[in-house]
Amino acid sequence: MGNGSDSHTYAVAIYAFTLVNSQSFLIYHLNKKPKLVFMDSGQKEGSRLNKFLNNPSKALWTLAIPIMAGMGIQTLYNIVDMIFIGRLGGEAIAGIAFNMPLFFLVLGLTMGLGTGVTASIARFIGKDNKAGADNCAEHAVAMALFFSLLLSSLGLVFGKHILSSFGAQGEILLLGWDYLRVMCIGMPFMIFSGFFRSILAGEGDMKLPMIVAGLGTILNIILDPIFIFNLDNYGGIGFGMGVKGAALATVISQSIVFCVFIYMLFIKEHAYITFHLKDFSPSRFILQDIIKVGFPASLSMVVMAVGQAVFNKILIHFSADTVAAYQVAGRIDMLVFLPIFSIAAALTTLVGMFFGAKEYDVLRYTVRYGISSAFGITVILSVLLYLFAPNVIGFFTNEEVIISVAVTFLRLFAFVYPLIAVGISTGRVLQGLGKGLPVLVITIIRVLGVSAPLALLFVFQMNKPVEWVWYAMMISTGVAFIIACYWLITAMRNLPKMERIPI
């Protein structure tokens, strides 16, 4: 993403999915006619466009609040999951932390391509070409099958070696491999479910994916303690499998999510999209259309996965507890980024809509209002986090070393979270203007050009303590903030001047 620290693995992944859904939802509802036949560009009165133009600030919250609710479901699970795992000790947290770059890579590939699937389906439906939309969905299923087999096989064959190359050793390596091995077996369920969500997003169905995601989250929270702990105080009903149990709980819940999607899409035929897999034939045009949109998004997340792996390897140089602290702090980040990502997602759709309608003054007003709102909310959350960081971290672990390192991280980043809010929102605005390259370029500069090289220099050449790793991330945040703002200001200046001023 455009700006932020490299510990935001899950937060960014959640945001990527939510952004895809929100954009497609608005594309669909702004243009629909009865029976899912889209109106032509001259028929604005039946859409929500005029309502949003008349009150763009209200429109921002109309979109952002539901997005925030959907993201909150997954955020809740990630926090609860880390609380359970934290009870197993710092080595368990570190073992899972070394898996995060791999999962982020998988999410980057599938969600990035899912973005392409969503955009392609939305365009086909917009052209009233249902056959093309159906064919695109069939390509998505074929891609899900290919990546499921490929990534699961690679993980099972090379996973332990990859974890070792990341710096995991001894007990941490064994714990990490226990977790990864189970997750690889269940990876097809997650990949297919991701592509199914992208298909539904393409036709504007927000409700079913959110309901199914909520079901999976609730199941995972219920199953986690049963599989992780022995639960002796509750009659010994638990399996006591530790980190392996955490992975198994995730796999079981995701397999149920997968089955619900299969039932709704292929048996009940809930969706507007219909599948004709027996008659499926690959289309070079559709594949190119998906990849053209999905590749930059995937590449950006791959860059962040590389950055995550580099920082894990740097931090293990200090101790396993340092890696664990970094992982815990990353989960707390999600509380701060929840409103940022929601506002940013709403900005992307509104900016894209107003840009397409050539309402440039309304667009400028919306950008100013959205970014200032994200900045103000983040300042408040940063102050609260700075004051109560020890209390928040205490929910995850009672190990003093982990608490100390994580609290230092959060209190330092409290000073740059508002800059991250501006950077993320700016990147999403540029995407709404049809400029996909800036986010990728800024991500590469931030992660590979500034933060990782500086951290390596500080730790291995200058022998600085772990706080200097956080300083490297903070410096890169400042650099990304400056570049993003310059890019946005330039883009805003290049917009034509109009007479209409929003009230």
Image (cartoon, helix red, strand yellow):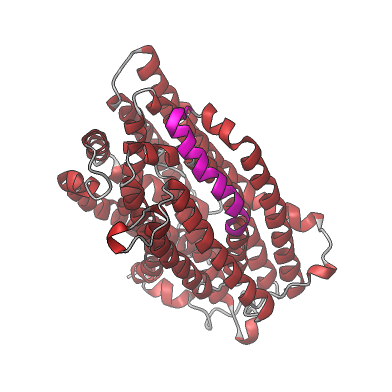
Residue at the front extreme?
235
- How far from the left and from the top, in percent, is residue 41? 62, 74
In this view of the protein, which residue sits in the foreground, 465 or 48?
465
- How far from the left and from the top, in percent, is residue 294? 63, 51
Indicate the quadrant where residue 264 lies: bottom right
Query: Above or below — where is 160 with respect to 61?
Result: above
In the image, taking residue 491 as reference, residue 151 lies left or right, namely right
In this view of the protein, which residue sits in the foreground, 366 or 392?
392
Residue pictured at 67% horizontal, 72% vertical: 125
In this view of the protein, which residue sits in the foreground, 263 or 169?
169
Query: Above or below — where is 168 with respect to 221?
Result: above
The stretch drawn in magenta includes residue 184: yes
Q: Magenta-highlighted stretch: main secondary structure? A: helix
Query: Above or below — where is 385 with respect to 216?
Result: above
Residue at the left extreme?
387
Indicate the quadrant where residue 497 lies: bottom left
Residue pictured at 60% horizontal, 59% vertical: 189
In the image, taking residue 466 as reference, residue 11 lies left or right, namely right
Span shown in magenta: 167-190
- How far from the left and from the top, in percent, is residue 45? 52, 82
Query: Above or below — where is 485 with respect to 163?
Result: below
In the image, taking residue 470 as reference, residue 189 lies left or right, namely right
Residue pictured at 52% horizontal, 29% vertical: 164
The stretch drawn in magenta includes residue 15: no
In this view of the protein, which residue sits in the foreground, 65 or 319?
319
> Which quarter of the image is occupied by the C terminus?
bottom left
Whether residue 435 is visible here, answered yes or no, is no
Whether residue 276 is visible here, answered yes or no, is yes
- How far from the left and from the top, in percent, is residue 32? 59, 79
Total marks placed: 0
